[in-house]
C-alpha cells in the first residue's frame, strides 16, 4: 500500500508539469500568430497603400493639374526633357471666416490672404472666368474653411485645405485653370 501511495505521489508532479508546459506552448503559439498577422499587415500597407507624394500625384492627375499630371513623382524627376510651364501668381482675395464648432462649443476665426498660380497662357481666360464667378469662388472658399476640422488648420502646410480649395475653385471656373493655391498671412484663433 505504501508503494501505491509513493507511485501516486510521484505521478502528481508529472501531471502538474504537463499543463504548465501546455500553457507556455499556447502562449508562444499566440505570440507567433500575432507577430505573423502584424507582419502581413505591415507588408500589405507598405506595398499597396500609396505614400503622400504618390497621393498628391494621383490627385493632380485626377484634376489634370501640372505638366506631370499622369506621372508618378519619381518619373517626373527623371524625365530628361521636362515640359515647364511658366506660371504667374494672382491675388484671389482677403478672407476672414468665422465658424462655430458645435462639438467643442468654440468659435474659430480664420484670417488669410489667398493667392493662386496659373499658367501664363491661361491668364486672360482665368481673369475672364474669375470675373464672371467671383462670388461663387468666394463662397466655395468660405464653405471649405467652415467645413474643415480644427486638425486641418494645425497641419503645417494646410495640404487638405489647399486641395479642397483648389478642387472647388477649378470646378467653379469650369476648367482646371488654377495650378495651385497659396495661403499668406494665415492665422486662426479658437475662442
Image (cartoon, rainbow, N blue to C red):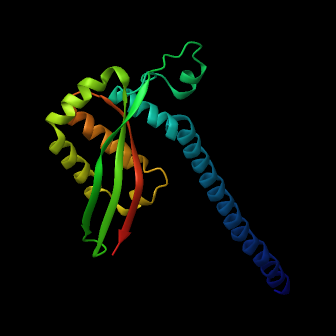
Residue 43 versus residue 70: which sits nearer the camera?
A: 70
Q: Residue at x 47, y 50 (%)?
A: 157
Whether residue 79 is situated above or below residue 165 in the rendered picture: above
**Quarter of the image holding residue 58?**
top left
Quadrant containing the N terminus is bottom right
Query: Residue 66: x, y in percent?
Result: 41, 26
Q: Residue at x 69, y 69 (%)?
A: 19
- Taking the view exactly as shown, the residue that stands out farthest to the top is 81
Left or right? Give the position of 148 relative to 139.
Answer: right
Q: Residue at x 60, y 54 (%)?
A: 34
Residue 96 versus residue 65: which sits nearer the camera?
A: 96
Whether residue 84 is situated above or below residue 16 in the rendered picture: above
**Quarter of the image holding residue 88?**
top left
Q: Residue at x 26, y 60 (%)?
A: 97
Whether residue 146 is situated above or below residue 61 in the rendered picture: below
Left or right? Give the position of 159 relative to 175.
Answer: right
Quadrant containing the C terminus is bottom left
Whether residue 82 is situated above or below residue 146 in the rendered picture: above
Residue 32 versus residue 82: which sits nearer the camera?
A: 82
Left or right? Give the position of 155 relative to 11.
Answer: left
Left or right? Give the position of 53 relative to 180.
Answer: right
Query: Residue 28: x, y in percent?
Result: 69, 59
Residue 179 versus residue 57: which sits nearer the camera?
A: 179
Query: Residue 116: x, y in percent?
Result: 36, 38
Query: Residue 120: x, y in percent?
Result: 37, 23
What count of labels does the image hold?
0
Amino acid at each position: 500500500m505504501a508503494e501505491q501511495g509513493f507511485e501516486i505521489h510521484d505521478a502528481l508532479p508529472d501531471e502538474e508539469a504537463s499543463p504548465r508546459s501546455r500553457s507556455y506552448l499556447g502562449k508562444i503559439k499566440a505570440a507567433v500568430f500575432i507577430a505573423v498577422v502584424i507582419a502581413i499587415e505591415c507588408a500589405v500597407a507598405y506595398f499597396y497603400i500609396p505614400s503622400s507624394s504618390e497621393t498628391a500625384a494621383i490627385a493632380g492627375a485626377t484634376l489634370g493639374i501640372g505638366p506631370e499630371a499622369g506621372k508618378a513623382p519619381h518619373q517626373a524627376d527623371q524625365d530628361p526633357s521636362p515640359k515647364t510651364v511658366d506660371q504667374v501668381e494672382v491675388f484671389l482675395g482677403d478672407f476672414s471666416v468665422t465658424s462655430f464648432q458645435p462639438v467643442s462649443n468654440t468659435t474659430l476665426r480664420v484670417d488669410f490672404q489667398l493667392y493662386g498660380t496659373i499658367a501664363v497662357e491661361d491668364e486672360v481666360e482665368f481673369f475672364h472666368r474669375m470675373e464672371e464667378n467671383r462670388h461663387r469662388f468666394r463662397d466655395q472658399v468660405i464653405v471649405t474653411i467652415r467645413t474643415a476640422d480644427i486638425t486641418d488648420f494645425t497641419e503645417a502646410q494646410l495640404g487638405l485645405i489647399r486641395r479642397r480649395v483648389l478642387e472647388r475653385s477649378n470646378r467653379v471656373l469650369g476648367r482646371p485653370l488654377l495650378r495651385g493655391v497659396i495661403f499668406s498671412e494665415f492665422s486662426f484663433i479658437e475662442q
